[in-house]
Image (cartoon, rainbow, N blue to C red):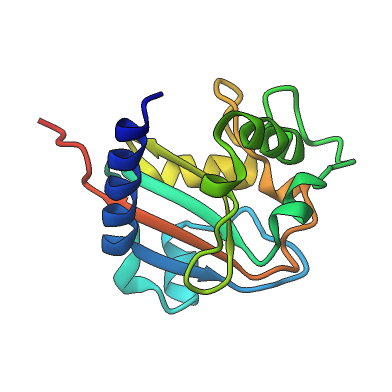
């Protein structure tokens, strides 16, 4: 990957990040299966930020530092074969991309632990929490001890035209 390409990618990423919506995920005993459904948005006073069924870019952040993220493991049996091992993936990504690009905290001191893009942002984010789709890999966030942490979801919708 050329240095110029990487610089342009970082500029684009920052522009998307600065234009995005954010949702705070409050600490709780567990995250339930209703997370990110319309009722969840309404209950948590995010009715104005309800993610429609549209394409876009998203990221997941929490109040862990990168060293803690790299150590994340799950003993949960629900972590099926297609679920991501967050700690293992983090260690692999840091070797591939380098700490200077992956270990920066966001403006609120949260560590971005994952980002992606999808034709339907809300469904993809729900998959990352609930592992409700066996046909694709997902993080399985409900299988890790993260619900007691403060999390944040960022998203920019309509990034890709449906036409």
When the figure is inspected, residue 69 is found, relative to residue 81, above or below; the finding is below
Q: Residue furthest bottom?
A: 45
Q: Which one is nearer the viewer's eye here, 79 or 105? A: 105
- Does residue 52 appear anywhere in the picture? no
- The residue nearer to you, when weighing 69 against 76, is 69
Q: Judge by depth and name the residue closer to the eye, 154 or 49.
A: 154
Residue 124 image point, x, y percent: 46, 40
In the image, farthest residue toward the left:
163
Closer to the camera in the image, 69 or 125: 69
Q: Determine which quarter of the picture holds residue 116.
A: top left
**Residue 7 point in image, percent of width and height:** 33, 41
- 115 displayed left or right of 78: left
Residue 73 percent location from the top left of the image: 83, 43
* Residue lying at 35% horizontally and 46% vertically, measured from the top left: 10
Specify the quadrant that holds the C terminus. Answer: top left
- Side (left or right) of 11 relative to 112: left
Residue 40 seen anywhere in this rendered image of the structure: yes
């Amino acid at each position: 990957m050329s240095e110029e390409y990487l610089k342009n990618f970082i500029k684009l990423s920052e522009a998307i990040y600065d234009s995005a919506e954010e949702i705070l995920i409050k600490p709780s005993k567990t995250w339930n299966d209703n997370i990110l459904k319309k009722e969840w948005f309404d209950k948590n006073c995010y009715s104005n930020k309800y993610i429609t069924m549209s394409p876009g870019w998203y990221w997941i952040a929490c109040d862990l530092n990168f060293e803690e993220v790299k150590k994340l493991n799950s003993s949960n049996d629900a972590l099926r074969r297609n679920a991501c091992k967050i700690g293992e993936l983090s260690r692999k990504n840091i070797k591939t991309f380098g700490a200077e690009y992956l270990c920066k905290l966001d403006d609120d001191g949260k560590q971005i632990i994952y980002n992606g893009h999808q034709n339907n942002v809300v469904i993809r984010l729900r998959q990352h929490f609930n592992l409700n789709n066996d046909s694709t890999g997902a993080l399985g966030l409900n299988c890790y001890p993260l619900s007691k942490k403060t999390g944040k979801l960022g998203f920019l919708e309509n990034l890709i035209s449906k036409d």
